Image: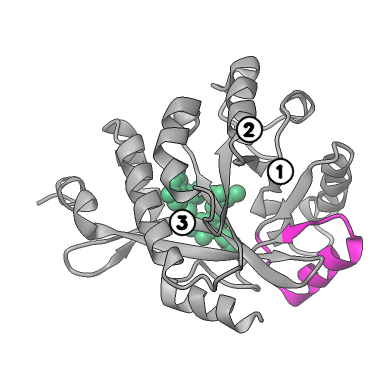
Amino acid sequence: WSFEARFLRRFQQRGLVCTYQPLLDLKTDLVTGCEVLARWRDVDQTLVFPDRFIPLIEKKGLTRVFTALMAQQAFAELASFIPLGERLQVNFNIFPQDLDADWLLQTFAPFIEPGSPFDLAFEIVETGAIEIETAQLTIDALRDEGIAVYIDDFGVGYSSMQTLAKLSVEGVKLDRGFAMAPDQSVMARMLDHALDLVQSTGLKVVVEGIETAGRLAEMQASGKVDYAQGYYIARPLGIDAFAQILTERD
Ligand code: G
Ligand code: G
Ligand code: MN
Ligand code: NA
């Protein structure tokens, strides 16, 4: 069996693994949410990373099946331990071609019914294929249902200042390349300006790729960052490790 054949046969039958990377709220210094990141367990138990299977999912037109499976699994795992009365922000990566309000609302509605402890957000990467007016209608429809949208990987690829100026979203996730850059490098110096740029829009700011205590302290001191994410805070974790972090926060 080729990798492709094994994956396609197994991913819909409990082969998917959800990991949860904590989002640290810099105002309170508490983990208040997570980004859900997919992994896949091969027959020999090796954990396979998304760079190998996401292209396959796209090629085979299985993006919606995959996202729906991820949502079912993630919310089932998360719901099992959220303490009564507490809330958790849950971020999902959505393929740009799936930015379709009807489908998204239908798929995610069961998990955000009244009384649910989850605040849902979608992360979307600008690919150049997004048509601003159409995207805005979708984003507005999602917001009406309490779902926030973030522009992901901002600052690389097709993401432009024009998108930022024209698209009304909840917030922006700065590409991890900025925070990961060595001190004094051009990218590191750009980080500060990128923060000013995003702040000028009034949007929420998430900085990804925090790998050192120094960078985290800098982000805290800047007063320009709402949420931080990165290996220094925590790697993408299995449900048990993530549950432990959340339980320890109080
Ligand atoms: O750790 P990381 O290797 O988890 O993820 C690599 C890339 O795969 C990231 O760009 C991330 O957005 C993407 N990815 C991971 N999980 C998902 C998912 O559930 N849905 C989508 N659309 N992309 C994902
Ligand atoms: O969706 P997005 O491309 O933003 O996915 C986040 C990706 O960044 C995932 O692959 C995740 O594992 C990775 N990541 C998260 N924090 C860090 C970090 O501090 N350093 C590095 N190198 N990668 C990170
Ligand atoms: Mn993301
Ligand atoms: Na990102």
Residue carrying label 1: 172
- Residue 171 is situated, as x and y percent measured from the top left of the image, at 72, 43
Look at the image and tell me in which quarter the C terminus lies.
bottom right
Asked if residue 181 can be seen in this view, the reply is no
Local secondary structure at mark 1: strand
Does the segment drawn in magenta span residue 249?
no
Is there a contact, CB below 8 Å, between mark 3 and mark 2?
no
Q: Is residue 116 above or below residue 235?
A: above
Q: Between residues 219 and 30, which one lies in front from this camera angle? A: 30
Is there a contact, CB below 8 Å, between mark 3 and mark 1?
no
- Residue 32 is situated, as x and y percent measured from the top left of the image, at 65, 65
Q: Between residues 106 and 169, which one lies in front from this camera angle? A: 106
Is disc 1 surrounded by few (<14), some (14 to 19) or many (20+) residues within 10 Å?
many
Nearer the viewer's eye, disc 1 or disc 2?
Answer: 2
Residue type beneath disc 1: Val
Is disc 3 surrounded by few (<14), some (14 to 19) or many (20+) residues within 10 Å?
many
* Residue segment shown in magenta: 209-227
Q: Is residue 63 above or below residue 24?
A: above
Residue carrying label 3: 37
Residue type beneath disc 3: Leu
